[in-house]
Amino acid sequence: MQNKNNKTILIIMHFAFNDGQFEKSLTGKVVEILKKHINVYCSFYKNKGTTSISKEFKELPYRHSGPPKQFLNILYMYRNNIQCIRSTSADLVWISATASIPLAGLFIYRILFPSKKFYIQLYTPSVNTSWLKRFMLNTILAVNLKFYKYIFVGNVGNNRLQKKFGIPDKKALKAGLGMPDYGFKPKDYSTIKLLYIGTITQREVWKTIKGIALFLKSKPEYYSKLKYDIIGSGKDNDVKLLTREIEERNLGGLVNYHGFLPTEQVKEYIGDANVGINFLPMVGFYNNSSTKTLEYLIAGLPVISTRNPYCLNIIREEHGVFCDDTPESFAEALSQLIQRINTFNPKKIRESFIKYSMEEVIKTDFVPKLMNIINQ
């Protein structure tokens, strides 16, 4: 497609990355696949270092100087993004958007460049625990979205993003980006190897550890046949709750918290695991799509998941079990899964969900729809 049309996309990021982390991020993987089909340039920010320009990426230093300078950082970010848009003859400008204060000025790009074609890559609504802050952030983003013609709303599960922000059908781009495919390895269930991947912040993952302690109290024979790895960073308080639970329950060695790990190591843990864990509070503002759940399923892992509406829509009996957001319910779900463990077929699970892999979705669905926008 790149050779025939020679079209170009400029991706504008509003996030800062450490050196080398962009290429390993989810968006970095999307860019890597997109480059097989179309020319891609990307503007993103580095936590440290000097400005460097390469063929595919424009890396800009993000000037962190503490809270008093945060507003200046935001102005600096917009200034550089505007310069990137002005200096690049892109056929389409892709803007990544979330419900956050730094993105309150998204409308400015549309005002300054009315003849440019823009596409908004919309992610989840705000998950701030304060109702008022969630309302304000979501409202600000909803107002900004009214300035744009093409907005990504996804196509897996329900159309909650479209409904949440009141996006009309004529503006909604119903296409997915897919999820990383970490490959497939045959599974051995002689030891139950649980795996949680994702943020720890406000997810109450500590409850899964308490749930394991409850399970082991009734089935002590699994002390030698159970392992639980937790991968992901979070706010200090959330991490302390988790590590304290491990210590107080004397589960060190059986439950291991690894913090943030690079993609290469995550791939190893997914290959070694045989059960994926998706656990989060059952409250309305968390009723969004679940990246980690699809990653588990694409790898052939049956899952234990809280009853998130998105997961209820895609997970069937042959894919895993559900629980409520309590330790007791998690313990019961773990018991149910172990009773049924040999009924799960990892190859069939993978076959059912490989259509959601990034490579497949971008090639068959996403790129054709982007080209449709460009050619209009």
Image (spheres, grey):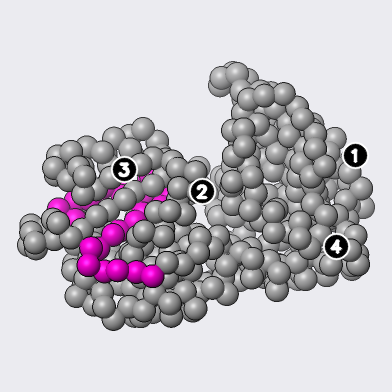
Magenta span: 186-215
Q: On the image, numbered disc 4 is attached to which residue?
A: 2
Real-space Cα separation, disc 2 to disc 1, in angstroms: 33 Å
Magenta region includes residue 204: yes
Q: On the image, numbered disc 3 is attached to which residue?
A: 257
Find out whether the residues at labels 4 and 2 contact each other: C-beta distance under 8 Å.
no
Q: Residue at x 34, y 56 (%)?
A: 195
Q: On the image, numbered disc 2 is attached to which residue?
A: 263
Q: Residue at x 42, y 67 (%)?
A: 185
Question: 343 or 26: which is nearer to us?
Answer: 343
Real-space Cα separation, disc 3 to disc 4, in angstroms: 43 Å
Residue 211 in the figure: left or right of residue 284:
left
Q: Secondary structure at mark 3?
A: strand
Q: Secondary structure at mark 1?
A: helix
* Residue 112: x %, y % from top left: 87, 42
Type of amino acid at the residue the image marks with label 2: Thr
Name the mark nearer the viewer: 3 or 1.
3
Residue 321 in the figure: left or right of residue 151:
left
Q: Secondary structure at mark 2?
A: helix
Q: Quadrant of the C terminus?
A: bottom right
